[in-house]
Amino acid sequence: MKVKILEKCFTGHGGNMMKGEEHDLPDRTAEKLIKRGYAEAASAPKAAPKAKAPKKTTRSVGLKKSEEKLEKPESDE
């Protein structure tokens, strides 16, 4: 199984492995490294994250206040 190393580690099959390297290891060894957080399965390049939409706000900037008064319904008191 092909893995990409995330942290420096040592295995009996490949010796010292440095961060960023890709190695083809036996499945069992690769699964152990992945489970323990030392590696991730090597795959196709990850797609770039989508651009986030601008944060929406309830603030009105640059608008003039209207002089019109809104009529509120009368309460049933």
Image (cartoon, rainbow, N blue to C red):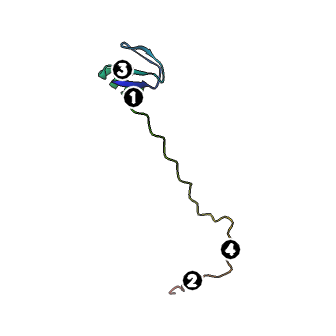
Amino acid type, callout 1: Ala
Q: Nearer the viewer, mark 2 or mark 3?
A: 3
Q: CA distance from mark 3 to mark 4?
A: 67 Å
Which mark is drawn over residue 42? 1
Q: Nearer the viewer, mark 4 or mark 2?
A: 4
Amino acid type, callout 4: Lys
Q: 10 Å neighbourhood of mark 1: few (<14), some, or many (≥20)?
A: some
First-in-chain label (3 vs 4): 3
Element type at marker 4? loop
Q: Nearer the viewer, mark 4 or mark 1?
A: 1
Instruction: Look at the numbered discs 3 and 1 and tell me whether their residues touch, using CB distance below 8 Å.
Output: no
Amino acid type, callout 2: Lys
First-in-chain label (4 vs 2): 4
Q: CA distance from mark 2 to mark 3?
A: 73 Å
Amino acid type, callout 3: Asp
Q: Is residue 17 left or right of residue 75?
A: left
Element type at marker 2? loop
Instruction: Look at the numbered discs 4 and 2 and tell me whether their residues touch, using CB distance below 8 Å.
Output: no
* Image position of 2 with respect to 61: above or below: above
First-in-chain label (4 vs 1): 1
Q: CA distance from mark 4 to mark 1?
A: 58 Å
* Residue identifier under label 4: 65
Instruction: Look at the numbered discs 1 and 2 and tell me whether their residues touch, using CB distance below 8 Å.
Output: no
> Viewer-proximal residue, 75 or 3?
3
Which mark is drawn over residue 24? 3
Place residue 63 in its image quadrant: bottom right
Instruction: Look at the numbered discs 4 and 1 and tell me whether their residues touch, using CB distance below 8 Å.
Output: no
Instruction: Look at the numbered discs 2 and 3 and tell me whether their residues touch, using CB distance below 8 Å.
Output: no
> Viewer-proximal residue, 57 or 41?
41
* Residue identifier under label 2: 72
> Viewer-proximal residue, 9 or 41?
41
